Structure formats: structure tokens, C-alpha cells
Amino acid sequence: MTTPTPISEVGRAQPASGILDEATLARLANEFFAALPGSGQPATSGIAALGRSEATSAPAVKTAAPISGSVPGVSAVSAPSGYAAALPRIGPLSEPLGAVPVAMPTHPYYFLAESSAFQSAPAGTPVPIAIAPASPPLSDTSLGPLPTEYPLPQARDSPGFYFLDPLQQRSLGAVPAAGLDAHPLFNVQAVRRDFPILAERVNGQPLIWFDNAATTQKPQAVIDRLAYFYAHENSNIHRAAHELAARATDAYERARSKVARFLGAASSDEIIFVRGATEGINLIAQSWGRANVGAGDEIVLSQLEHHANIVPWLQLAQEKGAKLRVIPVDDTGQILLEEYRNLLNDRTTLVTISQVSNALGTITPVAEIAELAHRAGARVLIDGAQAVSHLRVNVQALQADFYVFSGHKLFAPTGIGAVYGKSELLETMPPWQGGGNMIEDVTFERATYQKPPARFEAGTGNIGDAVGLGTAIDYVERLGLENIGRYEHDLLGYAMQGLQSVPGLRLIGTARDKASVQSFVLEGYRPEEVGSALNREGIAVRAGHHCAQPIVRRFGVEATVRPSFAFYNTCAEIDVLIRALHRLAHHIGRAKS
Ligand SMILES: Cc1ncc(COP(=O)(O)O)c(C=O)c1O
């Protein structure tokens, strides 16, 4: 009897001629190289793609192309020439609306050199990119025609905005200035091709995803990694002697190590997988908080906090008879450090603070805040939900006792996130949920518990999505957080100047140190109306209170419109936004007159 040789790719169609197509050749080559000693990757197709992906560094495409064309209302802002691919590809207003063919690399994905089932556009196909519309595209024709001239924002004598200051006056904060040095940049159009959803059309227009603070889109590498996990590795972890349990456990624990490295933790034992930032903060409140916060103790937090970093502490304070003390912000949305200093005292048990505000984009001085908190004998929790996709984080440098973030805001799947906790704290903390996986021994009289992090991961976790999170981290690390920060810095500057040119538009959140999130209100419209009008243009922004009612109310409103940008957004997309807002403003202006 002969035993058929197992083949890994059963059912894969081959061309009838027997000549392998380009994608298959690429896959086989990758499998070959992935199987070489030291590649660190199993020789299977999905992983082969990841392996190559891991070995590929972001090509430094630095074109010197000048910005051509002009956009009423936004033309005075210079996006650096290094980002030429991201610049508005806009001609005169008479230029026909349509897709602009973009030079394609030889493979469709920036980090994946082979095609996959999820390929959004075959290699060589021009990818439509958003360009500013030439003829009035607003589906709501009641908004009227586009005004021909927009007033440009005036140069400011005393610069109020970090991003709009003359370069020589900038004091570089947490986000480095873009285009000023020789760091390699990335090719935004190539990066966009890694995100299949960006090729979607919404209401007949190319999707413009400016809702990144709510959630980010996922690169093909992450989508493929999930598919690979369920096709080749899926098993429950830690508790079986079989091969798939070993593969799944390895993949899950490798992801934990990636998170630890990404956050600058001392050990992967300091990383607990949770559903996201909300669950992470609840874990800390329920475990550390219940054990360490008592009657009369004080928890200091800022006016900027997301509800996820308010409600768990409110609940704990109510249960324990503790008090919340709130650090106010100034009119730009930056926290007032002097006021913070005055709040600290020997009853302060915890200072809990967002590194980046989700509503305003403010980057808070967390290192200084942590230092002052420690001097007062308090512990420090940093909510990094909005920070990790924009800034390089090092929890040890920041002196964080705890740090939380959500994977879905970092180009990873939903339902997965992480808590960092200093080992010496985690060791002393009781479990917050009981069940499988977290115990050492159980009788009907008592239970003893595993060491951290297992102690805090009761039940079957979100194994596949944790693995996807590891791949998302690989992705942003390959692009480089510094490159991302520089690029987004310029996008935000470009957007702020464009937004300022819209009559009746008020920016909310103008701190000098900001990530690429910008709230505003537009006279004559409720934020939801602006959100709906933009949606008709294919532009996704958030409109509402952003689960941060205290800070939105601090600025005298109940809701704002909030575009938030990621490294795959472009100046051309911002132009489409600005033009749509000009139409809305013009329409209200006409209605008034
Ligand atoms: C600053 C901040 N903290 C916490 C959260 C909660 O994150 P999640 O809903 O992913 O748990 C968010 C979500 O928007 C946020 O922006």
C-alpha cells in the first residue's frame, strides 16, 4: 500500500499549462526562504507572507515633487515634499472628477509581497485615490454651489497653534516636526494598498476614513494572520499536549512578548490580555483599586478623560467612600500642571490620566504627571488608548505603574487589548475574575492562583485576536512610530489650517502638543448634521460627545465633529473634507442673507 505524500496546499488550482502563476511562484519562494534555518517562520503560505513581511523594511520613498495645483482655502499650507504621494492631486476646478492613477509597485501590498485572497486591487491596477471634487459633488444639492474663493487663514503674529507656528519657532513636543530631517519616509499610497477597506466606496464616493480615534482599519497582514491562525493553529492554549495547542500557545505568547517589547515593559509577565482599554481599567479598579483605595482616599484624574477612565473610579469611590479630584484644562485643552500639583496630597492613592485625549487630541505631559504623583506616594495609571497608534511608548521611561490600550485603535482586531502592570504590583494583586486558566489548585474549600499574568486571564481568552494584535504591532513598528508621528503631525497641521478657513467653524482643542485628532463645531449645524452631510460625501467622522462628556462640556458644547487621522490618510482627503465644510458654511451663509 502506498501512502500519499501529504501536500500542504490541497485544492489550490494550478494553471492547466503546469506553469505556475506569479503569485504561486512568489508563495513557493517565500515558503522556501521561510523554511531556511534562522527564518523563524514555518514554511506555510500565510506565515510565509508574514515572514517576508517581517523581513521587509519600509522603503524610503522620498520624492522631491513639488506640490502642484491649488485648493481654495487650503493652499497656503505646505505638506513636505517627502510626502508627495499624499499631497492633493488637484488641478483647477474645471478638472474632471475621477480616479487618479497612481504608480503601483510590482506587488500590491506594501509589506506583503504576494497576493492573497483578500487582495483589494490586483497588481498594476490603478487605485482610485480621493481627489478634491471638480464639480459640486455634494449629494445634498440644497447646499448650493461651491464658492469660488475662500479666505485663507491669516498668518498669526503670536502663534496659537503648535502645528501652524513657523518652523523656527516650534518647540518640538511629543510629536517631532515633519520633513525637517533625513529620516526615511513611507509611501502613503503604497501603505494604503495594505488596507483593503480603503478601496471601498461609500455613497458613490471613495471612502475617506477619518474616524480613526473610534477605531482603525486593518492591514491585510492582520487579516491574513487571523485567517492563518484559524486555518493552521486554532486550539485552546496552555492545557493540552497536542500539536495545535502548542502552536496556538506559542502564537499567543509570542504576541504577549511583542506587546511587552512595544510598550517597553521589563518582562512579558507584565502584560495581561484583556478585551480593551475599558476592561483593562476595570481590571485595575476591581483588583488593585479594591485592595488599595479606602475611605477618604483620593483618586486624581483629568477633565480630559474618556468615560472608561471615569466610571470605574466613580464606582470604586462610591463603594469605598473615596473621592475623585479633577485636574482642569486651559482653553486650549491642555491640563493645568499647577492645578494638578495643588491637588496632590498624602491621601492621593492613584493618578489616572489619558496620554492622548480622544476628544481633543491633546498629548498630556504624562511623564511629569507620573513623577509628581510618585513624589506624593501615589500610583499612576496611563490610559494609552489614543496614544499607541501615534507615539512611541516606553512604560518604564514614563514611570507608569499601569498602562492600558485597545488593539482595535492600533490596526488590530476588536476585542483584544492589554494591561501593563509593574511586576511588583501585579504580584500583590488579587484576581478580579475566577475560572479556568487562572488557578493553581482548587478544592471546595479553597483556591490558589497562578502567578501574573495568568492570574488575571480567567477563562478562554481572545487567542486569535491577540495573535492579530502581534501582527499589527509588527506592522506599525515596520513603518516606524517616529515616521508615523511626523507624517500625522503634518496631516494635522494641514487639516487645522484648512478647517480654520471655513467660515463659522470653531476649533475645539488647540493645545501645542496634539496627536492627529481635531474637534470642531460649525455654526448653524448640529454636529450630527455635519456628520451626516459628510457621510453623503463618503467621509466618515465622529459626531457626538465621544464618550468624554466632561471635556466636551468644558468647551460649552454637548457634542463636536471629530475627524481623526491615521498614517494612511492623505492631504487630498483632507481637501475633500474642507471643501465639503465650505459648502455647508456657504449654504448657511446664503440662508442667513
Ligand atoms: C482615551 C480612551 N480611553 C479608553 C477608551 C475605551 O476604549 P475601548 O472602548 O476600546 O475599551 C477609549 C475609546 O475610545 C479612549 O479613546
Image: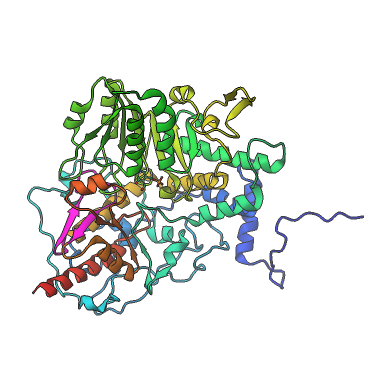
In front of the other: 410 or 86? 410
Splitting the image into 4 quarters, where does residue 477 fall?
Answer: top left
Q: Please tell me which residue is depicted at 57% across the width and 48% down the height of the picture.
A: 51
Residue 565 magenta-highlighted: no
Tell me where residue 245 appears, x and y as whole percent: 67, 41
Residue 119 rendering spot, x and y as whole percentages:
53, 64
Q: Quick check: 161 above or below 538?
A: above
Residue 514 falls within the magenta-colored stretch: yes
Quadrant assignment for the N terminus: bottom right
Q: Residue placed at 61% from the left, 26% from the top? A: 440
Kindly identify the residue that appears in the image at 14 percent across and 69 percent down.
150
Q: Residue furthest right?
A: 1
Give the quadrant of ligand 1. top left
Please report the bounds of the magenta region as a residue range.
501-522
Q: Is residue 146 visible?
A: yes
In terms of image quadrants, where is residue 240?
A: top right
Q: Is residue 208 left or right of residue 527?
A: right
Residue 577, image x, y percentages: 27, 65
* Image-based side of 331 in relation to 229, left or right: left
In-front residue for pair 55/543 = 543
